[in-house]
Amino acid sequence: MGSVPQKRMMINSGLMTIEDLADYLKVTRRTIYDWVKHNKIPAVKLVGQWRFKKDKIDAWLEGQSQPH
């Protein structure tokens, strides 16, 4: 129950954890790790943990929906 406000705060601050991003994109954490490993998604590593900027993720999503 205490983690919900913290999770909202993390997303509202613009930085998401792997778990936040998996929830946001409706994919598994394993999928996120795979994308990070293969440089398929914009990410930053802060103090040994992956973080994702919501605006960069939203822009990345827009790019994914464009025809290649």
Image: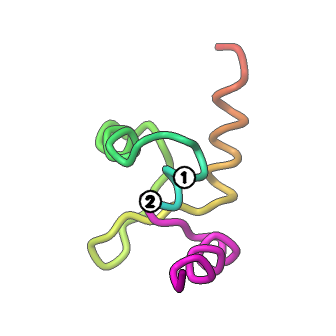
Quadrant into which the C terminus falls: top right
What residue is shown at x 54% (from left), y 80% (from top)?
Answer: 1
Residue 54: % across, % down: 64, 60
Q: What amino acid is labelled 2 in the image? A: Glu
Regarding mark 2 in the picture, which secondary structure is present there? helix
Residue 18: % across, % down: 42, 58
Indicate whether 12 appears above or below 27: below
Circles 1 and 2: CB atoms closer than 8 Å: yes
Residue 66 is marked as none
62 or 8, nearer to the observer: 8
Determine the image quadrant of residue 51.
Answer: bottom left
What range of the chain is rendered magenta?
1-18
Q: Is residue 24 magenta?
A: no
Task: State how many labels appear.
Answer: 2
Disc 2: which residue = 19
Q: Is residue 5 left or right of residue 44?
A: right
Disc 1: which residue = 23
Q: Is residue 5 left or right of residue 23?
A: right
Residue 15: % across, % down: 57, 70
